[in-house]
Every structure is written in structure tokens, then in C-alpha cells.
Amino acid sequence: MWDDVHGYLTPTATEDVDVIYFDRSQIDEAIEKEHEAQLHGLSPNVPWSVKNQARMHLVNQLPPYESAIDALAHFPETVTAIGVSLDANGRFIVAAPHGVDDIIELRLRPTPAFTDGSPHHHIYRARIQKKSWQATWPRLQEVDVSRHGH
């Protein structure tokens, strides 16, 4: 979508395709790697990244997540806190705990757990710098809201 808004005719290469799931009974990272290998076997040109959200709260030193959607709500940026799954009939279900306005309106903003003043804000800042989305899509505007409303 951001490529279209910027008038890019060639799609920007995807750094990774995140696949998340939630399974408290199997939190070994090796299982995630097995899933990645299976996906790679099906689509070898896709940079798969599979993560069980039942263990990912440890990475950001947050309380355990209750579900995959709860985990999405705790992603560092609102623009990455969106997921798509299929229902039993093969229809898409979109999960966007912080909405889709920031994606559509080209805004980079931390989710509530990562706002300025939170103990995890440095994770958001580091990701914004590492991802350098604004170098690829210069119309993106960062809105770094303060946890305290400043």
C-alpha cells in the first residue's frame, strides 16, 4: 500500500513475512524453525519468520500475552500491529487492535506499551531506526506520543 501511495511501480522487497501463532503448550523456539522450514519448502522465495506469541512477551520483558491478538496489541508500532487469518470458510479475518488509520494515513506511532515515558520506549526507537521505513517511504510521518500526554 505504501508503495502505491508513493507512486512506486516496482514493489519494495519484503524484509520478512511474519507468521504468528499462540500455543502455550509448545514454546520451544525450535518448533518455530520447523514451521519456517515447512513454509520455505512451500514458498522458498518468501522470507518467512514464524513466532509463537506465547513466548514472545519474554523478548520485550512484558507480562505474558493471552492470545495472538493480545500479542499484536503489544507490537512496538501500530503499523505492524495488524494480522490476517482465515476462518473455517477460507475468508479473511483482520485483527487490528489499534485500528488501521495509521497504516492508511502514513503515520508511525508506538503502541501504548512503547510510548515515550514507558520503560520499553527504547525498543520502539531502536526499531524505527533499524527499519528506516522513512528512507524507503518518505511521506511517512512519525507521531511519537508521550505516555503522559505531552
Image: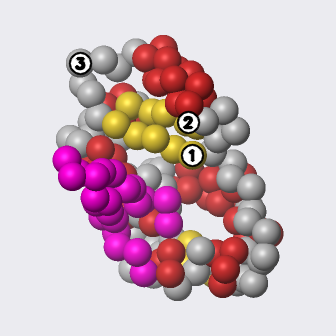
Q: Which residue is drawn at 50% across and 66% down?
A: 79
What is the CA distance from the residue labelled 1 to the residue labelled 2?
6 Å
In terms of sequence position, does the residue under pointer 1 or pointer 3 come before the other?
Answer: 1
Residue 49: mark in rendering: 2
Count neighbours of disc 3 (C-alpha within 10 A) and say few if under 14, some if 14 to 19, many if 20 or more. few
Name the image quarter holding residue 141: bottom right
Q: In which quarter of the image is residue 107?
A: bottom right
Q: Exactly how many numbered labels are in the figure?
A: 3
Between tags 1 and 3, which lies in front? 1
Is 84 inside the magenta-drawn segment?
A: yes
Q: Specify whether residue 117 is in view.
A: no
Q: Residue at image x 79%, y 69%?
A: 10
User: Which residue matches tag 3?
Assistant: 25
Q: Which residue is drawn at 39% across and 56% down?
A: 83
| Marks 3 and 2 in Cβ contact (< 8 Å) | no
Cβ–Cβ below 8 Å for labels 1 and 2? yes
Q: Does residue 3 appear to the left or right of 38 in the view shown?
A: right
The span picked out in magenta is: 79-101
Q: For the residue marked with disc 2, what is the amino acid?
A: Ser
User: Label 1 to label 3, Cα distance in Å?
Assistant: 24 Å
State the quadrant of the C terminus.
bottom left
Residue 17: mark in rendering: 1
* Image position of 57 with respect to 15: above or below: above
